[in-house]
Image: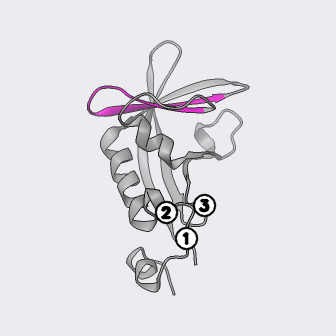
């Protein structure tokens, strides 16, 4: 039975005119896809009015907390000691969001309780105790 972690958080969307808009987001991780991290956005904050999810390598998040990382559609980089920028690149344009580094660090640490970084390709079926610990049913 896959275990899913969800951590609601807030972010600041940095506009082209350097204004900042508060937006809600949910950080999500599932043992069914252990190498990936997801950021979910509700419909009311997207351009097309539909909920959106960005999926990227969990390792990218860890690397981006320490130094600029990523070459593709998602890039992560530190912005001082307390904030981290996450950039989303798409055909429609680019969005830059600023997250509290502590939120991203806490989320990443929680994902490692489900699947350690060096075990992403191993069996990801958690044991019954782990499922119960994270509120799942066995």
In percent of width and height, residue 13 lies at: 48, 29
* Mark nearer the N terminus (1 vs 3): 3
Q: State left or right for residue 9 relative to residue 72.
A: left
In percent of width and height, residue 1 lies at: 58, 78
Q: What is the C-alpha distance between the residues marked 1 and 3?
A: 8 Å
Sort mark 2 into few (<14), some (14-19) or many (20+) by Cα contacts within 10 Å.
few
Residue in the image at 45% along x and 56% along y? 117
Residue placed under numbered mark 2 in the picture: 119
Given this view, does label 2 or label 3 mark the residue nearer the observer?
2
Which range is magenta?
Answer: 74-89
Q: What is the C-alpha distance between the residues marked 1 and 2?
A: 8 Å
Residue placed under numbered mark 1 in the picture: 124
Residue 26's label in the rendered image is: none
Residue placed under numbered mark 3 in the picture: 33
68 vs 41: above or below: above
Residue 71 drawn in magenta? no
Name the one closer to the observer, 38 or 11: 38
Q: Circle 3 — which element?
A: loop
Given this view, does label 1 or label 2 mark the residue nearer the observer?
2
Q: State left or right for residue 72 relative to residue 28.
A: right
* Mark nearer the N terminus (1 vs 2): 2
Q: Which SS type dominates the magenta stretch?
A: strand
């Amino acid at each position: 039975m896959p275990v899913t972690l969800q951590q609601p958080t807030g972010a600041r969307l940095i506009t082209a005119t350097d204004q900042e808009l508060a937006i809600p987001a949910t950080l999500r991780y599932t043992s069914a896809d252990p190498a990936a991290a997801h950021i979910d956005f509700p419909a009311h904050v997207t351009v097309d009015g539909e909920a959106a999810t960005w999926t990227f390598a969990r390792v990218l998040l860890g690397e981006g907390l320490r130094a600029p990382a990523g070459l593709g559609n998602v890039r992560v980089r530190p912005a001082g000691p307390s904030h981290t920028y996450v950039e989303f690149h798409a055909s429609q344009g680019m969005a830059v969001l600023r997250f509290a580094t502590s939120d991203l660090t806490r989320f990443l640490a929680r994902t490692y309780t489900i699947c350690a970084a060096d075990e992403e390709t191993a069996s990801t079926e958690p044991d019954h105790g782990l499922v119960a610990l994270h509120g799942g049913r066995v």
